[in-house]
Image (tube, rainbow, N blue to C red):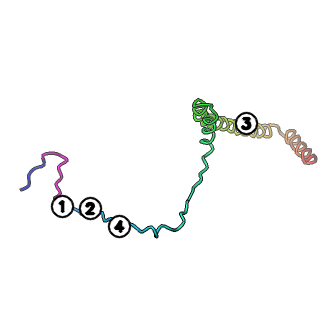
Amino acid sequence: MSTPRRYQFDNQLPVPRNPQQLPVYRPEPIGTPADYEQPQVIVQHIHQAPPDRTVQRIALGAGAGGGAVAAGVYFGPLLVGSLTAIAANLALLAFLAAVGAWGVVTVVRSIGGPDGKAAAHNLRKARRKRG
């Protein structure tokens, strides 16, 4: 008969008998000076900073101070977001204007009768001759 669990987090699994052995550090012998007579190769990586960081670094290096950096960091994305919103609104207004113009033309053609159709036909012919 097992003992009842006193706590909800008691582990009912048996304890492992042989815990895994940790790796043992074995130092390797140090090489002789003759091993190091080859010319040393220097690998140098030159990285270019992204444009936003470049502007910030120029602002700091030119003595403009942290205010210019903070303004660039804050107002840059704000400007992009506002221009995107304005462009989306203008695109929506252009779409609505096109739909409205199409609707007006359709209604005028259907109501205008033969005179309206003849006028549209003459206008179309005049445009073809010019273009």
- What percent of the width, then of the height, locates residue 74? 58, 33
Magenta stretch: residue 9 in it? Answer: yes
Instruction: Report the disc number at residue 22.
Output: 2
User: Label 1: how many residues lie within 10 Å, few (<14), some (14-19) or many (20+)?
Assistant: few
* Residue type at numbered disc 2: Leu
Q: Amino acid at mark 1?
A: Pro
Mark 3–mark 4 distance (CA, rounded to whole Å) = 80 Å
Q: Secondary structure at mark 2?
A: loop
Left or right, residue 103 beside residue 76: right
Q: Residues within 10 Å of mark 2 (few under 14, many from 20)?
A: few
Most extreme residue toward the right, as rendered? 129
- Dot 2 or dot 3: first in sequence order is 2
Of residues 106 and 22, the one nearer the viewer is 22
What segment carries the magenta color? 6-17
Whether pointer 2 and pointer 3 mark residues with C-beta atoms closer than 8 Å, the reply is: no
The residue carrying mark 3 is: 97
Q: Secondary structure at mark 1?
A: loop
Q: Which mark is residue 28?
A: 4
Q: CA distance from mark 2 to mark 4?
A: 19 Å
